[in-house]
Image (cartoon, rainbow, N blue to C red):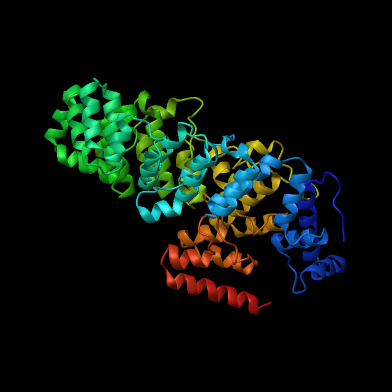
């Protein structure tokens, strides 16, 4: 049995596992014997997960997580490790383990971290998706864990209740109200639909237009009847808004429209313009090019210098849906975004590649050039462009990793929980982009040069490439991954489900689930 050094390196251990997987794949008899000594049923090729399990057992640990925990302890990362364990306990709804960790590490209660979650309480209450409704709130937040943290004395920073408003988590809103932790401000009265507190507050204070507008938006997000009261107050300060509403959709219809659609940017551009912006965005969604152009010509402010951010969002939405005609038509109207240097930050090309709409990239290039990085080259199927990122011996030669996606996108990196930057994850992302866009020759090249087919890359939270493909209905790419031996038992971060489970229970597509099962059976039978 091997012995760990006094200060072991987790990166060195990962490299040992990668080398073992490569050696097994190459048919090295010693490597195969090592693998079978720890996993008797092991056969080439060896997955990265199994290679890590072999290395862990060689050092006397039952699994990779146990080995990682020991390495972190020896390198003095006690609080860092306890934070990771506490987050895992929150995610798993393991309240007993969470209480144990809080008892062992009281500093967890005041830890705020360096991410966007505002500490453990923020992690428990924040939501990747919309958390409106009991079921979605259970999916995306951890109310019971939040209560454990509150009762233990966790620090409540202002970002936490603000995050609850963004996620529309009504259960958490009531929890924080019961605990006396909600700010006594107009927007929180509006969120709870507390008409008495709201009207009393309005009587006592002459709120400005921005505060009333924000409260109205919050009330409509939580579908509260007090929104009508707030709209009347807003109109008192903005009579032109009232005239526009009365000449069109009507006040009751306007309230219902905001409740149903939740238009964005109302606080920045006003209620009426946000109403118009959503209508233009919805024309893209509905593939209504004529309506899209008519609204842009009727609302020229959307093409002006002050609306560059909104133009960016329209282009991103069109890229996400693969609506090339909308991108071309918008840019042909000569919007201000064409004259901004450097161009504003955007996810448009990222959306185009991630959701397999690379045909829109030439149109987007009038604003944003294709990034000069490995994943982008792979996503558009540029094999020569991919090869330039490898040295003469086939090793990755990426230069500054921070210039490559996802490390040049803090949002994407945070969603995948990929820190710090590593060449392996850049390689894995490139592989994912090649597979998603059916550039299988590029994908084979990347596999042969170290990409991990079992990476936990996904379009948002950690899962597998196969999970992503389920919702893209990309059978060719799913077949490619299965033929190349992807581990179909990999489970995602949030629902602890396989890709087959996503097809069956998330997408409600039993035909796809059975197709995946049969494809895996055929692969297993073929050896």
Q: Is residue 391 left or right of residue 84?
A: right
Residue nearer the viewer, 166 or 151: 151
Q: Is residue 172 left or right of residue 355?
A: left
Which quadrant is home to the C terminus? bottom right
Q: Is residue 324 left or right of residue 404?
A: left
Query: Picture coordinates of residue 247 (x, y %)?
Result: 12, 34
Which quadrant is home to the N terminus? bottom right
Query: Picture coordinates of residue 225 (x, y %)?
Result: 21, 41
- Number of numbered discs: 0
Query: Picture coordinates of residue 498 (x, y %)?
Result: 54, 64
Residue nearer the viewer, 49 or 125: 125
Residue nearer the viewer, 425 or 348: 425
Which residue reaches farthest bottom? 525
Task: Tell me if I can see residue 80 in this picture.
Answer: yes
Q: Is residue 191 left or right of residue 364?
A: left
Residue nearer the viewer, 95 or 303: 95
Say which residue appears at 18% left-offset and 27% top-offset.
Answer: 235
146 in relation to 308, above or below: below
Say which residue appears at 60% left-offset and 66% top-offset.
Answer: 489
Say which residue appears at 29% left-offset and 32% top-offset.
Answer: 215
129 in relation to 183, above or below: below
Query: Picture coordinates of residue 465 (x, y %)?
Result: 57, 57
Task: Tell me if I can see residue 458 in this picture.
Answer: no
């Amino acid at each position: 049995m091997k012995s760990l050094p006094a200060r072991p390196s987790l990166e060195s251990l990962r490299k040992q596992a990668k080398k073992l997987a490569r050696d097994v794949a190459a048919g090295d008899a010693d490597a195969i014997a090592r693998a079978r000594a720890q996993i008797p049923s092991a056969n080439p090729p060896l997955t990265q997960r199994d290679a890590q399990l072999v290395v862990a057992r060689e050092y006397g640990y039952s699994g990779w997580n146990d080995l990682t925990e020991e390495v972190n302890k020896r390198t003095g990362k006690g609080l860092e490790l306890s934070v990771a364990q506490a987050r895992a306990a929150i995610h798993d709804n393991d309240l007993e383990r969470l209480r144990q960790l809080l008892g062992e590490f009281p500093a967890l209660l005041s830890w705020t971290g360096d991410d966007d979650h505002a500490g453990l309480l923020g992690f428990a209450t924040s939501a990747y998706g919309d958390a409106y409704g009991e079921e979605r709130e259970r999916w995306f937040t951890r109310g019971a864990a939040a209560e454990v943290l509150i009762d233990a004395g966790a620090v409540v920073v202002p970002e936490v209740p603000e995050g609850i408003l963004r996620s529309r988590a009504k259960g958490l809103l009531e929890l924080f109200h019961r605990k006396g932790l909600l700010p006594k401000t107009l927007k929180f009265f509006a969120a709870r639909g507390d008409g008495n507190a709201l009207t009393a507050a309005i009587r006592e204070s002459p709120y400005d237009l921005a505060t009333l507008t924000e409260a109205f938006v919050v009330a409509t997000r939580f579908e509260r009847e007090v929104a009508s009261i707030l709209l009347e107050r807003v109109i008192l300060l903005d009579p032109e808004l009232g005239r526009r509403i009365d000449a069109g959709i009507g006040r009751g219809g306007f309230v219902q429209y905001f409740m149903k659609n939740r238009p964005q940017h109302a606080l920045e551009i006003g209620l009426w313009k946000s109403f118009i912006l959503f209508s233009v965005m919805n024309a893209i969604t509905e593939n209504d090019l004529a309506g899209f152009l008519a609204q842009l010509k009727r609302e020229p402010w959307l093409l002006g210098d002050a609306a560059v951010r909104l133009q960016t969002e329209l282009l991103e939405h069109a890229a996400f849906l693969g609506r090339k005609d909308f991108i071309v038509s918008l840019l042909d109207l000569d919007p201000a975004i064409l004259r901004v240097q450097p161009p504003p930050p955007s996810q448009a090309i990222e959306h185009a590649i991630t959701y397999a709409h690379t045909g829109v990239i030439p149109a987007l290039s009038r604003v944003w050039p294709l990034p000069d990085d490995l994943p982008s080259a792979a996503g558009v199927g540029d094999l020569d462009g991919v090869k330039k990122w490898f040295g003469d011996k086939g090793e990755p030669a990426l230069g500054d990793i921070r210039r490559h996606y996802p490390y040049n996108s803090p949002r994407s990196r945070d969603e995948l929980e990929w820190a710090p930057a590593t060449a392996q994850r850049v390689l894995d992302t490139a592989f994912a982009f090649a597979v998603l866009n059916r550039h299988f020759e590029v994908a084979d090249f990347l596999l042969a040069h170290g990409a991990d087919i079992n990476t936990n890359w996904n379009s948002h939270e950690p899962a597998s490439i196969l999970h992503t493909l389920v919702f893209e209905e990309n059978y060719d790419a799913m077949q490619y991954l299965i033929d190349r031996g992807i581990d179909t038992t990999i489970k995602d971060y949030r629902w602890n489900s396989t890709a087959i489970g996503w097809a069956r229970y998330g997408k409600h597509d039993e035909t796809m689930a059975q197709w995946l099962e049969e494809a895996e059976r055929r692969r297993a039978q073929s050896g």
